[in-house]
Image (cartoon, rainbow, N blue to C red):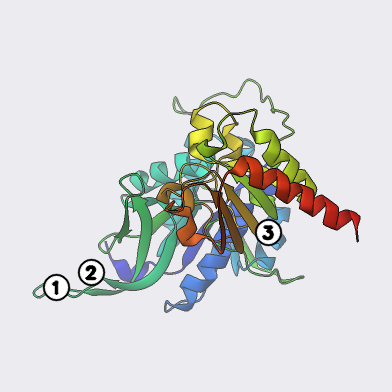
Amino acid sequence: MNLEEYKGVYVFAQQVDNEISGISYELLGKAKELAESLDTKEVTAVLIGSDVKALADNLAEYGADKVIVVDDPELKEYRTEPYAHALASVINEYKPEIVLVGATAIGRDLGPTVSARVATGLTADCTVLEIGDFPLVAIPGQEQKHKQLLMTRPAFGGNTIATIACPDNRPQMATVRPGVMQKIEPVKGAKAEVIEYNPGFTPNNRYVTIKEVVKAVSNTVDIMDAKILVSGGRGVGSPENFKILEDLAEAIGGTVSCSRAVVDSGWKPKDLQVGQTGKTVRPNVYFAIGISGAIQHVAGMEESDLIIAINKDEDAPIFDVADYGIVGDLNKIVPQLTADIKAAIANK
């Protein structure tokens, strides 16, 4: 493999029902940053689907210099085989140095399949991506390679952090959790060079047949979009006790979320879980109520603008990351806080 042939940072621009997923814009922002550190400053989005060419302008506004469009009726709904064939063919044809994929349900299926197909490595669920030297510290007698993609992710259940590189193969591939990277401010009216590419699709015994698509209807608010989150942990005590958190959220225009322990206990649905195995959130205000602050949970909310913790244990790790902390009984503190907020609003 001639590593010098591989140039540029590519992003798999996930779309569902001809609508670009938010993670695609987040990855384009990070791709622009990575490209600035490399010899090439070009960012390319790979858009796969059916009748999706019109979405290219959206990607240009969020940082794509080029958009490679793979458009075919076989790509109307996501299926592993045709999508893997499409992305792997793009990689083999255009030889990108870096490929970023969102760690969504689609990306977690597609990324590893494609990396195996193009004979390279993949680091999953990354939380930090940067360009640097590998090994990180020079080792006597071992070549230290420069301008490598350093991919950092939690390991061993979140108890340690691993930085991984792929110095001997290309492309360097990573999946990134939604909410971890930040979108750039869109440039209205921006245009990208659009390249139409179709490797051809011949259904085989690895193509599944979709008989019916059933969309679930949910009234649950996506906690990743919330500006204020009132999050509860096992310390709330019971599912019924979440009523006091719901009252606080209603008073301040927030949304209720929770820790993994709450989901595991069956008190709240998985969609509301914050943390390493849940969702990564960046609200303006994050209330951590009855949450001890395990590293797995903190990984999903530490980028919040303002963190307010309420816990009866003064030694709870959550206070290490909180901007404000209240030690005491949440059953007394939260209702009083809610009442004070309602009174303040009423007196405006």
Where on the picture, by quarter, is residue 144? bottom left
Camera-side residue of 252 and 191: 252
Q: Distance between the residues labelled 1 and 3?
A: 45 Å
Residue 165 vertical placement versus 146 (above, below): above
- The reply, left or right, for residue 246 in relation to residue 72 is right
- The local crowd at label 2, few if under 14, some if 14 to 19, many if 20 or more residues have their Cα within 10 Å, is some
Q: Of circles 2 and 3, which is in front?
A: 2
75 vs 200, nearest the viewer: 75
Residue in the image at 47% along x and 66% along y: 9
The label shown at residue 135 is: 2
Residue 339 percent location from the top left of the image: 78, 48
Is residue 200 at least partly visible in the picture? no
Circles 1 and 2: CB distance less than 8 Å?
yes
Q: In this view, does 198 lie to the left or right of 296?
A: right
- The disc labelled 3 sits on which kind of residue? Ala
Question: At 64% from the left edge and 53% from the top edge, which residue is drawn?
Answer: 22
- At label 2, the amino acid type is Pro
Q: Looking at the rendered structure, which numbered label has been put on residue 139? A: 1
> What residue is pinned by disc 3?
56
Quarter containing the C terminus = bottom right
Q: What element carries label 1?
A: loop
Mark 3, secondary structure of its residue: helix
- Relative to 321, residue 156 above or below: above
Callout 1 amino acid: Ile
Snapshot quadrant of residue 218: top right
Image coordinates for residue 150, horizontal then vertical, percent: 35, 65
